[in-house]
Amino acid sequence: MFRIFVPLAGECATQVSEPPKISFSMKESNARFADTGITISELGTHFVVHCPKCAGKSLVHTFEEGHRLVCTACFHVEMPGHWYGEMRAFVAVKCRECHAPLHRNAKTDGVWKKLAVHCDQCGDDCEYDAHISRYPRNDGRVADPIYGLPLWLQKEFRGDVFWCYNYEQLEVLYGYIGAKLRERGIAPRNSIRKNSSMLNRLPSFLKAAGNRGPLLKLMDGLRLK
Ligand SMILES: [Zn+2]
Ligand SMILES: [Zn+2]
């Protein structure tokens, strides 16, 4: 089982039509890296995914009216509508018999909208109406939030999964992970510090000094993909 870092719910800005303005300062390979405070929302406006027809590289772009997928390999074009990813069923109720709070979260096909829940307190078994939601995973891989198709830029790394929505996000992470001065705790001037910054929310395996070399090698591979 891999641990996967996921942007918090609601962070994927699907309404933004302008491409993100990305700026980060990198001078040569060992320069400092200035976190401009860019968020997953700003980077998650477009996606590189596997085509639903041929599994080739497809681009999901944002337009005024929504999104559109275009495959660079077979030229398949698809508007949003069908969700290819996983679905989750969630129940949070009080037991019908003893009123103890019950919670259950399970994978579902999205067709059956009830979830069986066992009450540990009184032993009652009952099916409750479940809240069904899309889950950005596809056959165990991290998926985009619009179509649920596996992201093109992802790779297993030491029990975790490194993934990016697009090449711009990959470059930001490359600059961050590649910067040497960051590890000496030098706060770059003029940087915007805020909790929503993607770089403030990175999982620890991306920040570990010992992982830097292998991660850069992994990212070099993804840059050419
Ligand atoms: Zn295709
Ligand atoms: Zn009960």
Image: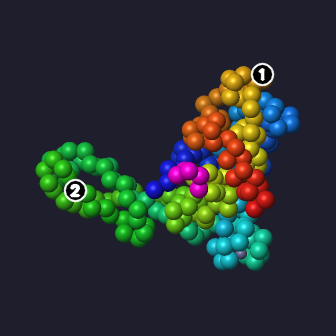
Labels 2, 1: front one: 1
Residue furthest to the right: 28
Distance of label 2 from label 1 (alpha carbons): 55 Å
- Towards the viewer: 87 or 67: 87
**Residue occupied by mark 2:** 118
Check disc 1: other Cα within 10 Å, few if <14, some if 14-19, many if 20+: few
Q: Which residue occupies the foreground of this view, 96 or 42?
A: 42
Picture residue at 78% right of the left edge, 30% below the top = 32
Q: Position of residue 115 (x, y in %)?
A: 31, 61
Establish if 79 lies above or below 1.
below
In the displayed structure, 32 sits above or below 157; it is: above
Tag 2 and tag 1, C-beta contact below 8 Å: no
Report the front residue among 147 and 18: 147
Residue 189 — which label?
A: 1
Q: Which residues are magenta?
A: 156-160
Q: Is residue 218 magenta?
A: no
For the C terminus, the quadrant is bottom right
Direction from residue 219 to residue 196 in the image, left or right? left
- Tell me if 175 is positioned left or right of 110 in this view: right
Q: Secondary structure at mark 2?
A: strand
**What secondary structure is the stretch in magenta mostly built from?**
strand
Q: Percent x, y for residue 204? A: 56, 38
Whichever of callouts 2 and 1 sits on the residue coming sooner in the sequence is 2
Secondary structure at badge 1 equals loop
Specify how the rendered protein is coloured: rainbow
In the image: residue 26, left or right of residue 85:
right
Tally of numbered tags: 2
Residue 74 visible = yes
